[in-house]
Amino acid sequence: METTSRAEPHDAAGGDSGRGDTRGVPGPRPVIEGYLAADFPWYGLDDAFTGARWLTQVGTDANGSVEHGATGHGQEPTLRAELGHEDQRFAMVVTVADRPVRRSPDGTGLLEATSPSSAAWLAGSGLLACTWPAQMERALRQDWLEQQTNIAWELADDLDGGGWSRLSLPVDGVPTPFHYRESEYGWVLAGAAPHGVHIGAYGRGMSAYGLGFAVVKDIESYSVRG
């Protein structure tokens, strides 16, 4: 489907393990510098959204080139038990560079092209990262994570299948088609965008139907989570 590896949900874009351990977490400048180093523009919610905006870490390839990242809007999702999923209100916008088929960094093979499916997978795994049942018995929780991760992967690989509906939302003011799905944990959407990128998004407590996306003019205006 795409070049993104199938990381565990709690390691995906925007994930929060809920442990509160900040050892080894990069400071604000390294995080922002990752966004500034990208050779493609970043997307976020448009100016109609007036709430808090923040950044997660970027994703890179084996050569260190920036491939994707996520801009956060609203509350930072958390797995802390005192804040139930139903109380969370956020939307994450995932930007994925549009890459063609290319050689792997070690020159031994080819990497598949990125596509809206790449954005759908990152968005789906990101949603899992902030909704997995932290209070579930450990063995059952791991089974749940593996099951839901496989479902997210299969859905992302079949955007024209019955698991998705169509939704039109503005991107830089232009109506743009997206693949959209809802679950008890939140919603996920993905589609193509101008400027050589694909857009994915996921959220909870904020309706996807009223959202609009726009190029981020000043990425340093976003705070850094931590």
Image (cartoon, rainbow, N blue to C red):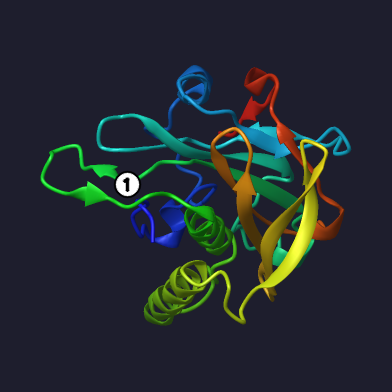
For the C terminus, the image quarter is top right
Pointer 1 local density, CA inside 10 Å: few below 14, some 14–19, many at least 20: few
Q: Where is residue 75 in the image (x, y as percent from the top left)?
A: 73, 46
Q: Is residue 36 visible?
A: yes
Q: Position of residue 28 (x, y in %)?
A: 53, 22
Please give left or right for residue 164 compared with residue 226 in the image.
right
| SS for callout 1 | loop
Q: Residue at x 53, y 22 (%)?
A: 32
Q: Residue at x 47, y 41 (%)?
A: 98
Residue behind mark 1: 101
Q: Picture quarter containing residue 72? A: top right
Q: Picture quarter containing residue 190? A: bottom right
Is 44 rendered above or below residue 27? below
Q: What residue type is labelled 1?
A: Val
Is 216 rendered above or below residue 45? above
Name the one closer to the observer, 81 or 110.
110
Number of marks drawn: 1
Q: Where is residue 150 in the image (x, y as percent from the top left)?
A: 42, 75
